[in-house]
Image (cartoon, rainbow, N blue to C red):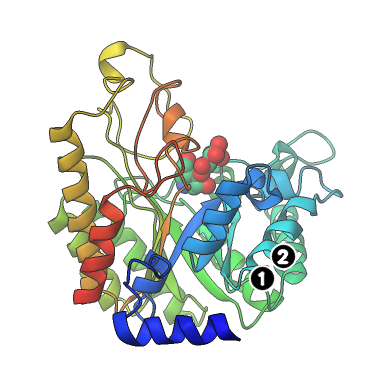
Amino acid sequence: MRIKTIVAAITIIYGTTSPIMAQKTLAEATRGKFLFGVAVNMQQVKGVNPIESDLVAKEFSAIVAENCMKPQPIHPEENKYFWDDADKLVAFGEKNKQVVTGHCLMWHSQIGRWFFVGDSGKTVTPEVLKERMRQHIYEVVGRYKGRVKGWDVVNEAFEDDGTYRKSKFFQILGKDFIKYAFQFAHEADPNAELYYNDYNVEIPAKCDAIVQLVKELKTAGYRIDAVGSQAHMHMDSPTLDETENSFIKLKAAGVKILITEWDISILPSPYSGANISANFKYSKEMDPYRELVPDSVQMKWNKRVLDMFGLFLKYHDVIDRVTIWSLTDNVTWLNNFPIRGRKDYPVLFDRNNQRKSVVEDMIKLAKKH
Ligand code: 9MR
């Protein structure tokens, strides 16, 4: 009781930014504007590294599973589901009063081969695939009904040129597979928000295709709440203008926007997508910052983070959540993509689990908006 009184007095005198008070977090700084989330792995959920778990719990208002809710891990065989990890993750989020997002229901990648193969070893018929989708979505969404706020219902259905990706789903069911997925997800949890999620949404042709999809879904009466823009970025692309234009188009389409997988690679890239099958050969030139990041490069990265974050803040009326794709530079997927074994620095906490200096500037910027 006495401690509480002292804390209250300090807050009145100095405000929450007092050095003797706990540091403000990005989640606090962005409250009322958008959720500030992070993708988590199972070590963090299980507390294998308690410092990381603690950071996830304290610094973020939302979490999403980096892997454990994807079709393959959660549904490895036709009649076998693996719930342990996803159950723990959802409970972890609830314990920490965080909004939990489900990622992802239908994705051409990280899905068991069995999904598309029938008894005879032949590709399944459209009817069978549709029924498998229904069962999968009903089971997964149904299990976390009321506990997961929203689902990435379909992930990465478009190519960068705006044509449909020729995934197994598309080959077997045509573009209607998307409608079926949204329908089943809505039936399984009518209160859950439903999202379409993709990378390189800043490419005009791809953004236009997504807008067209949103229109088709809405016109046909399907629920779609938001488009997730993964926002895996590089030092020079996409530009601020390209990013803003994608926001303008999505906003006009009448959906919310989620920044779902934000990171900014500091490394040179031979490739600018997030298609995980892309892989290039290692070379020292492509891994220039093993020992340290030069100040000039770090300053450029910091500026890029602030410029983008400023843009997210500008559009906070339509952006509901900004999620960082992994907690620290240690655990980011970009250390192994699109070239294995590099040292990247794309997120907001460093390899010693410390906040990068740019975070304070982001917090200051959030206050101005
Ligand atoms: O970060 C994820 C990595 O650990 C996985 O190995 C990879 C393969 O499934 O998926 C990564 O997350 C992807 C996300 O689910 C969808 N958009 C692209 C992300 C980066 O590949």
Up/down of 49 relative to 129, above or below: above
Dot 2: within a 10 Å radius of its alpha carbon, few (fewer than 14), some, or many (20 or more) residues?
A: some
Which quadrant holds residue 228? bottom left
Q: Position of residue 322 (x, y in %)?
A: 39, 63
Kind of residue at badge 1? Glu
| 10 left or right of 314 in image | right
Query: Is label 2 in contact with label 1 (beta carbons under 8 Å)?
Result: yes
Q: Position of residue 255 (x, y in %)?
A: 37, 76
Q: Residue at x 63, y 65 (%)?
A: 93
Q: Residue at x 28, y 25 (%)?
A: 292
Q: Residue at x 36, y 31 (%)?
A: 344
Q: For residue 183, say whether it is visible.
A: yes
Q: Position of residue 68 (x, y in %)?
A: 66, 49
Kind of residue at badge 2? Ala
Q: Position of residue 25 (x, y in %)?
A: 40, 65
Numbered label attached to residue 137: none
Q: Residue at x 47, y 36 (%)?
A: 333
Q: Secondary structure at mark 1?
A: helix
Q: Front-most of 162 and 6?
A: 6
Numbered label attached to residue 94: 1
Q: Quadrant of the N terminus?
A: bottom right
Q: Is mark 2 within 8 Å of ligand 1?
A: no
Which quadrant holds residue 87? bottom right
Q: Front-most of 89 and 7?
A: 7
Up/down of 186 relative to 310, above or below: below
Q: Quadrant of the C terminus?
A: bottom left
Numbered label attached to residue 91: 2
Up/down of 150 relative to 5, above or below: above
Whole-number angstrom distance, CA of label 2 to CA of label 1:
5 Å
